[in-house]
Image (spheres, rainbow, N blue to C red):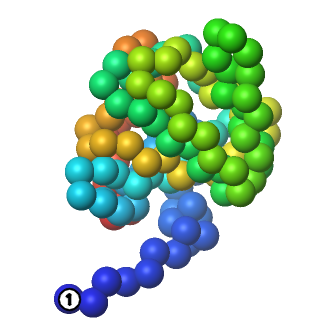
Amino acid sequence: MVPKAIDLVEKFGAFQERWSPKIVARLNDYEIKLAKLEGEFVWHSHADTDELFFVLDGELTIEFREGPVRVAAGQMLVVPRGVEHRPIARGLVQAMLIEPSGVINTGDAGGELTAEYDDSLA
C-alpha cells in the first residue's frame, strides 16, 4: 500500500466545531489531531502524557499558573505531563495536536467542553 499525503486545508474545511479535535492520522501509538480553537478553554492537566500544540494559523496563548506563553502560526509548544494549563484563542486558531491514543481533551477537568472521540477524518 502506498501512503497518501494528507491535505490539511481540506481536512480543516471538513468541520466547524471549536475545541473538538479530529483525528487525521495515527503514528505508532499516537494520534495526530486537527482542532479549531476559539475563546477560552478550561484549566486542566494530563497526568500521564505531554501534549504538543502546533499552531498552523492564528495565535494561541497557553496560560500556566506561572504565566502565559504565546504560540504564533508556525510555532509549537509542548506542555509537560502533569502541568496545569489553559489554552486561549482570542480569534480563530487552527492547530495540530500530537498525543497518545485516547487522550481526552479536557484531561482531569472534564465538563461540557469534553470532546467526543472523533476519527472521522482519518
- Above or below 22: residue 49: above
In this rendered view, identify the residue nearer to me: 15 or 51: 51
Locate residue 77 relative to residue 1 in the image: left or right. right
User: Can you name the residue that lies furthest to the left here?
Assistant: 1
- Residue closest to the eye, 77 or 13: 77
- Residue at the location (42% across, 33% down)? 50
- Whether residue 9 is situated above or below residue 58 in the rendered picture: below
In the displayed structure, 105 sits above or below 118; it is above
Lateral position of residue 35 relative to residue 71, left or right: left
Q: Seen in the image, is 12 located left or right of residue 74? A: left
The residue carrying pointer 1 sits among few (fewer than 14), some (14 to 19) or many (20 or more) residues within 10 Å by Cα, namely: few
Q: Position of residue 14 (x, y in %)?
A: 52, 63
Q: Residue 102's x, y, as percent? A: 26, 38
Q: Residue at x 60, y 70 (%)?
A: 9
Q: Amino acid at mark 1?
A: Met
The quarter of the picture where the N terminus appears is bottom left
Q: Residue at x 67, y 57 (%)?
A: 56
Say which quadrant the C terminus sits in.
bottom left
Residue found at x 37% / y 83%: 4
Please tell me whether mark 1 sits on a helix, a strand or a loop: loop
Q: Is residue 99 visible?
A: yes
Which of the 4 quarters of the picture holds residue 71?
top right
Compared to residue 16, the image places residue 39 above or below, namely above
Q: Which residue occupies the extreme bottom position in the image?
A: 2
The residue at which mark 1 appears reads as 1
- Residue 70: x percent and y percent? 76, 34
Q: Position of residue 92 (x, y in %)?
A: 73, 44
